[in-house]
Image (tube, rainbow, N blue to C red):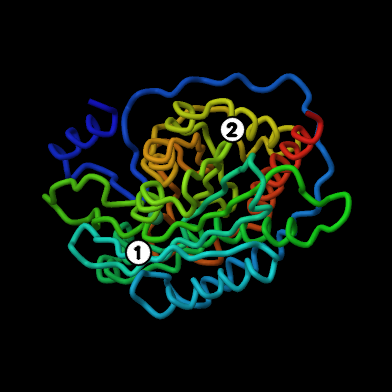
Amino acid sequence: MNDILRFATGWFKLPALGVWLCIIAACQEQPKEMPQNTTKLILHPTPEFNADSAYTFVEQQVALGPRVPNTEPHRKAAEMFLSAFRRFGWEVQAQDFEAIAYNGTILKSRNIIASYNPQAKRRILLAAHWDTRPYADMDEDKSRRREAIDGANDGGSGVGVLLEIARVIGKQQDSLKISHIGIDIILFDSEDYGQPQDEEQVAFKKDSWCLGSQHWAKNKHREGYTAYYGILLDMVGAKDARFLLEGHSMEYAPSVVKKVWDTAHQLGFGKYFVYEATNSLIDDHLYVNQLAGIPMIDIIQYEKGSFGSFWHTHRDKMDIISKETLYAVGKTVLQVLYNEDAAIAEQ
Ligand SMILES: [Zn+2]
């Protein structure tokens, strides 16, 4: 029995107590600890990550309205992402599919896939989910729990950071042009359409979250596609966010976690990237690890059983988004990509 199944079984017995989620605190196993970095990494030059621009990308999503599958804002957002990646010079495709939600609703879904340097063999995969939760099932105001949330942080922030990374990489022409590695950005759809967790006595339905990553992992956009490793961004924009060492990331890709956290520390972002273990979470990276066989980590705000007080409430809107947090995450990921490109160039 794997940890998820153990978790699921336990959950089924105690449905009212739990937190099942867009991302679920899966098991109580303590992940491995990781020592803080003491060796100095070389930080190769990168272009500037513009936090104002990343913030604007989040705002533009929120301005459309909640990006819930089968709605107009959702359709418009997908078109907006496709045209943005094209404008930034990336090769783009939409992977359209129908996902079946926990309640039988058919969700017209689109994974958005953008590729940079599509011929390169050594590839890095970056991802975030772009759909937003149809419910505010954690909101204090019970009368508004069946209204969709803005999802500025939950959905919007990860996409905003990735669009800015795509923009700055795409526009480089000279010495800062990435030329040795390929990069794929996947915006997964239908991640957050799981069962409302304020419903009592509902049976746990396995694998009812993260439908876009499950679909992609079973139907990759390119035959035989693989990547060196992957980095998932989820809820990476809140003021004073802290990103801990998530259990599944440590289980499947500890060296990638170390690389990213060490890079963040060296850049001075130690207050965001903390060397402390936290639970294993069910998020898109789990399916990429288990079904696609690509080691993938999750940069996610989760600590002491909480994704933050705004999570799955109507408080998840623009005023909780911090440019400083977007910058810390975006600059770190950009640095990891440039270091990877330089490392391969030196081989
Ligand atoms: Zn969520």
Q: Given the current orientation, which residue lies at the most extreme right position?
A: 175
Q: Position of residue 160 (x, y in %)?
A: 60, 61
* CA neighbours of label 1 inside 10 A, class few (<14), some (14 to 19), many (20+): some
Amino acid at the residue labelled 2? Val
Name the amino acid type tagged 1: Phe
Left or right: where 314 falls relative to 173: left
SS under mark 2 = strand
Q: Is residue 213 above or below residue 29?
A: below
Q: Which mark is residue 38?
A: none
- Classify 10 Å Cα crowding around label 2: few (below 14), some (14-19), many (20 and above): some
Q: Is residue 131 left or right of residue 83?
A: left
For label 1, the residue is: 97
At which x and y percent is residue 9? 17, 34
Q: Residue 273: horizontal and vertical position, in percent?
A: 61, 36
User: In this rendering, which labeled residue sits more in front, label 1 or label 2?
Assistant: 1
Q: State ligand 1's quadrant.
A: bottom left
Q: Residue furthest bottom?
A: 72
Q: Residue at x 56, y 69 (%)?
A: 81
User: Quarter holding the N terminus?
Assistant: top left
- Asked if 7 appears above or below 143 in the picture, the reply is above
Q: From the viewer's perspective, is 89 left or right of 112?
A: right
Image quadrant of residue 83? bottom right
Query: Residue beneath label 2, please?
Result: 274
Quadrant in the picture for the C terminus: top right
Question: Looking at mark 1, is its residue's CB closer than 8 Å to ligand 1?
Answer: no
Image position, residue 311 (x, y; %): 41, 55
- Label 1, secondary structure: give it: strand
Horizontal relation, residue 179 to residue 21: left or right = right
Q: Nearer the viewer, residue 112 or 70?
A: 112
Name the residue located 37 percent from the left edge and 69 percent from the top edge. 68
Of callouts 1 and 2, which one flags the residue occurring earlier in the amino acid sequence?
Answer: 1
Q: For the point 53% across and 48% down, which residue is it?
A: 233
